[in-house]
Amino acid sequence: MRSKGIMEWKEWVQKHILLSIILLIQVLFLLFLAVGLFRPAYSVRMTAQNFTEAISSAAGDEYQVAVDGEAMRFTIADDVKRLSIEDDTNETVLTALKSDGFALRSGAYLVTVHYTADSTSPSTEAAKIQLKEPRFTKLVYNESMTLDGAGNEVTTRLWVPLGANAQDVELTLTPRGECNFQIEEILVEEQPVYRWVRLLGFLLLFAAVDFVGIWLFTGNMGKPSDILRRYKVPFALGLVCLLACLPFFCDGILWGDDMDFHLTRIAHLAQSLQEGQFPVRMYTDMLNGYGYAAPLYYCDIFLYIPAVLFNCMLPLQTCYKIYGVLVTAATAAISYTSLRHILKHKEIAVVGTALYLLAGYRLCNVHMRAAVGEYTAMTWLPLFVWGMYKIYTHQKPAWRQWMPLAVGMAGLVLCHVISFEITCVFLLMFCLLRAKETFKISRLGALCKAAGTCVALCAWFLIPMLHSMATQKILGTQALPADFQSNGVSLNQLLELFPFQKYSNSLGALGAAVTIGTLIAVFVLAQRARWKRLPQNVLRLLQCSLLLGVLSAVFALNAFPWNSLLSHVEGTFVHKILALAQFPWRYLTISTILLVVAAAAALHILQQNRPELYRKAQTLLLSTAVLYTALFSYNLFQVRTEVVKYDPIARDENTIGMAEYKLPGDADLNYARPQSENADLQIKWYDKTDGIAHITLENTGDAEATVTLPIFDYGNYHAVDTEGTEWPMTMSEDSLLQITVPGGYSGAISIEYKEPLLWRAAELVSLATCGGVLALWLRDKKKRKSQQLPGDFKGQVQQGGTL
């Protein structure tokens, strides 16, 4: 047998000699990368000696550079400090210092600058640092670093492409003239984890290329036409995903409305994971070290994917784009699976998936608004429809019928609570609409089981969120929208068929395909008396989804009298419930999936009764969706700026719309230092490392003294001294942590954020529930496989109910 296999292999090689050579080259290349995994990490340390020539020719009228050992001390002239220093304008800029050239081999590097400045404000710029290879472009990829007055260390990332010969890399240091500063050292250190990432990336690339090559040029995998026929669904879904992701395939990243917030979330989530938090509850270094509890209110479990990739030294923009592609693929898979199980028709499921992925509102969410939470939530909405359909078409729904609803609603909670709340409103409306069926014991029990499973799956997030909401007063819960209606969309915006205008609206367009699909659904419903084959379950699905879909679209309009309604309940709980969407156009999230389901149900009825009309409708919908996506992508490149973003947002994080989850108070975020009104309390040292604050104090007086820490008091902070004694803490008027120090005390205290045991217990509940759901699914899959039952749970469907 072994000799026979060798002979067959030799024959294959002889028959496909060129392909065999290519495969051999790939293997040798992968071996080369594998050997490089064990190479010692490369590093460069730069001090004042690397700038000797530049220092000797520095402009003395602008600043002075003094060499103190290995450090460089920059003293800026007084008149220069008053200048407005801008690199990209014609205004005065200070003379830059360039280091001696040094070599960097291929790989990813972390560049760290250790410095001190005579300022305490992060908005004060001490200097800018840029690394480049002056002879060739694209030999070094990195962003410039800004040394601010509040820090003592700044980092950036740098990449040298595979095979590049970066022999003369220069570091340019430009003082900004806003404060005096001193640079101790600059470290350029290779990160070996990137070697593994690069090896894995090439391995996956070669596997995909080889699959296509063997398929096209050898015939060993069958004729291309046979393979396309066999795998037409994956190919079709792949093409739809490719169209939906076209804007991701640019060199940089097309800047969206919420991009800065979500990129910052990814970066701080990655940092928190490195600090050892899991799950991450607090961005300890956000807002200049004051801390930000966004994960307690805005779940970021799905952002762990780009965060882990970022910790593997991939550029930030690449991490974000990979996440966008993965979400699109997951949306396609879940949408197709849901529609196939509902309508029992693969072709219609593919058409419905294409309409959903290429819907105008979803494309705007992904590419124009960069609304990560909302477009991730749209991944789970098809499961909501699937679960409700199964529950209401079975007299006694089993776990297989209500589980999609539980998982779908849990997915909504864990990516966008507002989308979950909106969906709950329409779930309640549907249950009341079908009250007679809803209040049957078996069906009501199924809904309760789905709700209980959803809560258990999300307990690890819900319990901390509800506990925090009960004990904290964040700014986002203090004010309710007084002019909710004005943020709705006009009817013209809602029905905008194609984005022909250069500055097309980015919020309220359903898109031509969804609009035409809605008209087809109306036509089929109006002609239902003429159809001979009219499945009642599909008809009820069409009626309910069309009614609720149109109603949700009406809710999104600025013509809907939201303000008139809210004026009667202003400031009450009802006001909060009605305005929970924050912006009326968010109702288009649920409207999009419902109208797509209505269109798919209409296609199913047409296919049963008028096949020729079904083909025309299918062709019209698909061609319209493709045309809309092409025009949208073209328009997007006209109105959005392509930005290269390798590192986290380099700006004052207090200015990028992050106030929603902040605590009340007037704390000066530009000043991140402990403060005390008692002159006897001396603060000898303060620093924050890996999310833990360390402070050294001495109270020279006899009376107690209070120190206010630059940390927001979100609760669950613990202060422990070097002897293991825990210190009580209080909250200041500005919502900051305070420690009362007794007279005569001298010592060091560490302040760390720790989860309470209740939260840990909730995590165990969610973990056990997730394991139970997975075990049920695996057992059911094994059972169906042993019975050889293809498709949708044959033999288990009870057709006693109606939708």
Image (cartoon, rainbow, N blue to C red):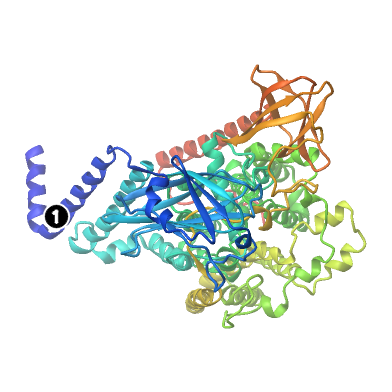
Residue drawn at 43 percent across, 41 percent down: 70
Relative to 672, residue 364 above or below = below
> Quick check: can you spot residue 583?
yes
Residue drawn at 73 percent across, 52 percent down: 660
| Front one among 394 and 108 | 108
- 306 left or right of 738? left
Badge 1: how crowded within 10 Å, few (<14), some, or many (20+)?
A: some
Q: Position of residue 109 (x, y in %)?
A: 39, 47
Could you tell me the amino acid type at mark 1?
Ser
Residue at the farthest bottom position = 500
Quadrant for the N terminus, please: top left
Q: Position of residue 476 (x, y in %)?
A: 77, 52
Q: Position of residue 128 (x, y in %)?
A: 51, 56
Relative to 212, residue 110 above or below = above
| Front one among 687 and 229 | 687
Quadrant for the C terminus, please: bottom right
| Front one among 725 and 479 | 725
Relative to 77, residue 268 above or below = above
Q: Which residue is mark 1?
A: 20
